[in-house]
Image (cartoon, grey):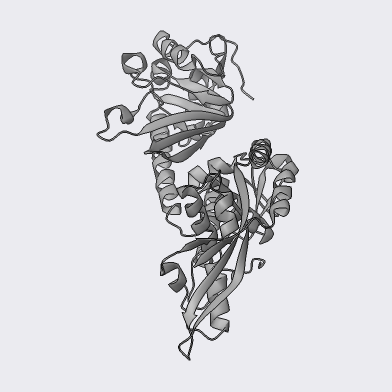
Amino acid sequence: MARLVGVTGAQDQVRALREAVDHSPPEREEAEELVADYERGRWLPVRLELFADLVGDEGRVERFDSIHVEGVWFAVPHDANNVRHAREAADQRFEALQEHLVQEGFEIAPGQLEALPFVLDLDDRLSEAIEGN
Amino acid sequence: MAAYSDVAQQPSTAAHSWLTRSMAGATIGYGGARRAVRVFDHDPDLLRGLEQHEAAEALAHGVAAVARLEKGEWHPPARGGGEVAGHPGLLVIEGQLARDTTVALAPTSELLGAGDLLRPWQDESEVASLPWRSDWEVLQPATLAILDARFARAVSPWPSIFAALMERMTERQRWLALQLAIGHLRRVDARLLVLLWHLGDRWGTVHADGVHLPIRLTHAHLARLVGAQRPSVTLALTQLTEAGRLRRGTGGTWVLLRPAPDLASLLRKPGGSHRDDGAAGD
């Protein structure tokens, strides 16, 4: 129930890394290395969109995808750590999705979304970008 | 800053041999041959329970050579054997070290600092049925007091000192257990918050606005401490800062803003948001 879309918000995320000037020296050095790796094509900023496909009263499947997570970074080429990172980023926002669904009239208990299978869907542009070819 | 005695204090020959081997190939400045410290000047808590006159006497006898470690990898030889027999350990006077343990490419880390007792020659990985490894890294320049066999004999009239040292080892075990528990929290921001407040309990100073934590760690290191991916730590720290849980202090330190987090609010509450403990929302 998550989709990673294209290469969006890249400049904002890169700017955030560059602006780590008030961080401690180890963090500044780390941020500089990450920016350098990004410029070498080894990291890709992505946006995570959380969605849930639910069956409504009329029996139709409806997709709710209002929760977005910026600040996600994928390593190039794609590996299992990217999936772990996506799941950890999604975990931060499942409650917001649950609250949104409750507002839409669905009975979703806290924790219920996290217990469902987590499916990661990469859009075509992102799939091509993170293969590192 | 280390205080040096007027009397030249060298570590025992065996300890000197082991330390010399441990410094080989590392960015280490071993200045112990001519420098010593009165250990209890730097760690008076070890004298807890002693009468004043006993503490004064222990203070005078509790002199140990020091080793200075610069930032970088540290490769102490394992299994010191007879060289370090009877040596209580290396007491961290100042600085920051990490001991990373890796199983099948999955690393975790233990953070060590002032007051911790190290026994780096004790390494069980060599006799393990399944392979794992441990590595040491000096994160911030460190000063270690060499509590060798001679030191042990010098302070032997005061058994409470050894009890205090054993208490330090027990504390390390308990903190590692806490770290294990932290790793079971689902959300990375919750793991980080609990970890940072725990580190604040150990090394922070209390101010009106919160706890100031003079810890300088990369996000990669924080990730190893909480069992998460490095980018997830960066994301969670940003979210915690925006939520008013943390802010940067001077010199890159962390300020843990009051009130301390309510643990129940870090977990899922039926029908409630994790923000209902009063912290700023998204």
* Image x and y of residue B140, in percent: 60, 30
Q: Nearer the viewer, residue B111 or A48?
A: A48
Q: Is residue A43 above or below residue B136?
A: below
Front position in the image: A18 or B116: A18
The picture quadrant where one finds residue B17 is: top left
Nearest to the observer: residue B46 or residue B221: B221
Query: Viewed as shown, does residue B122 lie left or right of B223?
Result: left
Query: Looking at the rendering, in which quadrant would you find the C terminus of chain B?
Result: bottom right
Q: Is residue B84 visible?
A: yes
Q: Is A33 on the left or on the right of B196, as rendered?
A: right
Residue sitting at x 61%, y 48% = A44
In the depicted structure, whether residue A27 falls above or below residue B226: above
Q: Position of residue B247 (x, y in %)?
A: 69, 52
| Res. B133 image quadrant | top left
Quadrant for the N terminus of chain B in the image: top right
Q: Residue at x 51, y 73 (%)?
A: A52
- Residue A80's spot in the image, x, y percent? 45, 49
- Asked whether A2 or B14 is in front, the reply is A2
Measuring 48% from the left and 24% from the top, which residue is drawn there?
B58
| Residue ranking furthest to the left | B129
Q: Position of residue A81 (x, y in %)?
A: 48, 48
From this viewpoint, is residue B160 visible? no
In this figure, what is the number of numbered marks? 0
The residue positioned 53% from the left and 34% from the top of the image is B113
On screen, residue B85 versus residue A92, left or right, reads: left
